Amino acid sequence: MISAFDGSGITPFAGAGPVVDIHFNVIGALGTSSPLNLTNFRYNGGLVCSAPSSGTLTVVSGTTSGMVTYENEAFPGPGPIKPVPGVVLDAPGSPHVTATSDSAGHYSLSGFGPGPYTVTASRAGYPIPHDFADHGIFSNDASLVARHVVHLTTLSPTQIRAGTVNGLNLPISSFDAALIAQWIVNVPNVNNRTGQWIMTPTTTMPNVAINNTQNYTALLLGDVDASWTPSMMGPIEAPLTDLEKITDAVHVSLASVKAAKGTEVVIPLRLDNLRGGEVMSYQFSVQYDPEVVQPAEIAAEIAGTMDSSFALVYNSTNLGLLNIAVYGTMPVTGDGVYLNLRFSVLGGAGSTTPLSIQHLHLNDGSSDVFVTDGRVSVKRLGTSVLTGRVSTSDGPAAHTLVLLSGADGVRASAIANEEGRFEFSELAVGQTYTVTVASRSLTFTQSAISIKNSITELDLIAEQY
């Protein structure tokens, strides 16, 4: 029997809501229940409630909790423990119980019925098409698989599991390397499991009558070198602006050309300033205006280039964007042309499009990279071209990086050719621009030049000591 009244005994209360909390010690077995019958409810001097509603107390389960961590270690390992958020722990039953791992990888399941329950762990994979940002899967993962197959690298058992992406239950092979590269550039394949997650264990059957601790590991297929991060999306690298860092960085550039409508242009991709560094893999996308150019039937090729022994995969089906992945088994060294892009020119006179390099990932992504975009254009009236030559007393300074900036907001860069020649187009007549040469071994005086004619010449000669 319970009796309650307003403690003041003076001021009545009004409105709907709880008036008293009843506490019980639960001693029954799991799954048992007891009715809570409300009888003889009276208030205000004996008035009987006209519509009492009884309740039920049911003895429910213990709690199953734990943590989900990333199974793969940093290549070659070991690395820090990585929590995996977003893993769904699903336990169908009566009632149906679910939980999702948080940013620290923790989860907790409670409120089970009498059972039995089977808990299944899963995490949504990265679909095709996906953006070209960092999912932890890069062309160097394909390279690692290819090197393992020919016994140039020995992968750990976990890395072999991550690299075996074929859905045909075949042992790891060069086929898996090709599937990873295809996934990177958004080429679909029904047998490709790249970007999917596997959990260990996949299912568990907890004793729901007690508290349990159950941990899981998660593995992203295709991420051989364990570069996936808990945030799922890696940080967007800001463009290099410091001249010293630009000077030391690997210079990646696409050429700028002028062409007539109806022609096909070849745009070389150069890697310079490697300074003995090796190239094992790279990937990037090129954004362009499809009203001006479109990829040719053979949109990219590596025949006759520095890395002609590598494997090339590209996807040009999405107009305005060309995705490219290149990987090999033996590293290549030396500055030069690593890839040729081919575009058909559709735009009329005066049209222009940048060839913007995006999401570039060289090898394992640890090197600073300075990117020079390309351009396909037909010269516009009222603009000028700045051409020049970079040289020393001994001759041309080939493949030197030249930077241009103007008060009108123009920022551009160019790589001097074998003769030391460079060019900046689409410059405003009457505008003054600053030209800087970024070189580790040579010193040049910064030049300010005013554009007065349709073609302006500038010679940049290294200082002598």
Image (cartoon, rainbow, N blue to C red):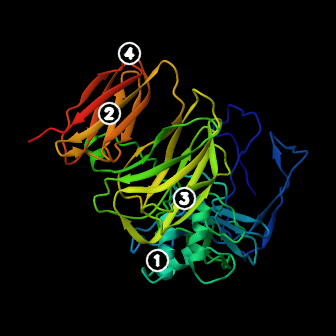
For the residues marked 4 and 2, what is the alpha-carbon distance in whole angstroms? 18 Å
Place residue 13 in its image quadrant. Answer: top right
Residue 301 image label: 3
Tell me if 91 is positioned left or right of 53 in this view: left
First along the sequence among labels 3 and 4: 3
- The correct choice, above or below, for 63 with respect to 36 in the image is below
User: Can you tell which of label 3 and label 2 is closer to the viewer?
Assistant: 2
Horizontal relation, residue 180 to residue 409: left or right = right
* Residue holding disc 4: 430
Three-letter amino acid code at disc 4? Gly
Where in the figure is residue 305, as x and y percent of width and height?
A: 45, 60
First in sequence: mark 4 or mark 2?
2
Task: Name the quadrant of the C terminus.
Answer: top left
Tell me the mark number nearer the camera, choosing from 1 and 4. Answer: 4
Quarter residue 96 falls in: bottom right
- Among numbered discs 3 and 2, the one appearing first in the sequence: 3
**Does label 1 or label 3 sit earlier along the sequence?**
1
User: Which residue is denoted by mark 1 in the rendering?
Assistant: 147
**Relative image position of residue 296 (x, y in whole percent):** 63, 49
Separation of marks 1 and 3 at Cα, in angstroms: 22 Å
Q: Residue at x 26, y 45 (%)?
A: 397
Q: Nearer the viewer, residue 223 or 429?
A: 429
Vertical order, 98 against 372 (above or below):
below
